[in-house]
Image (tube, rainbow, N blue to C red):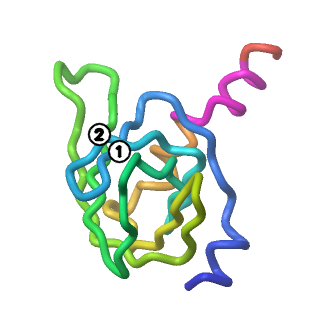
């Protein structure tokens, strides 16, 4: 799965939040099956974690909550990377819709 993640397009997103084992953590980048998060203070990485994504969607009063069980791939002092099974079939489409680079490119057109 790690090699597959490297081939996947990574998104820098707005409107998607994450908690790592219940602790809020900023998303550095995210792909269909993996995420790199800013490592929370005093966080000790474990082989497995629960990540809950909070996704803002048009027309919804509250963000959609999506929970995944993830496996640690890499941990540094600054960030942690996890792989997971996509929580929805249309997960990649949701990520594209929240991708800040894609939104910037559309506004330039």
Dot 2, how many residues are within 10 Å of its Cα: few (below 14), some (14-19), or many (20+)? some
The residue carrying mark 1 is: 18
Residue 1 in percent (x, y) is at 55, 85
Q: Which mark is residue 53?
A: none
Dot 1, how many residues are within 10 Å of its Cα: few (below 14), some (14-19), or many (20+)? many
- Which type of secondary structure does the marked residue at label 2 adopt? strand
For image coordinates 26% across by 47% down, the residue present is 23
Q: Quadrant of residue 36?
A: bottom right
Relative to 49, say whether 51 is above or below.
Answer: above
Disc 1 to disc 2: CB gap under 8 Å: yes
Work out which quarter of the rendered image holds the C terminus and state it.
top right
- Foreground: 54 or 61? 54
For image coordinates 21% across by 44% down, the residue present is 65
In front: label 1 or label 2: 1
The residue carrying mark 2 is: 54
Q: Is residue 21 left or right of residue 104?
A: left
- Foreground: 41 or 18? 41
Residue segment shown in magenta:
98-106
């Amino acid at each position: 799965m790690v090699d597959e993640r490297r081939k996947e397009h990574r998104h820098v997103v707005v409107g998607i939040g994450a908690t790592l084992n219940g602790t809020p953590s900023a998303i550095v980048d995210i792909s269909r099956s993996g995420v790199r998060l800013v490592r929370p203070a005093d966080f000790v990485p474990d082989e497995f974690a629960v990540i809950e994504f909070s996704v803002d969607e048009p027309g919804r009063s509250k963000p959609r909550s999506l929970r995944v069980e993830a496996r640690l791939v890499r941990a540094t002092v600054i960030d942690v990377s996890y792989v997971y099974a996509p929580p929805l079939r249309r997960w990649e489409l949701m990520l594209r819709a929240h991708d800040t680079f894609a939104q910037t490119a559309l506004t330039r057109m």
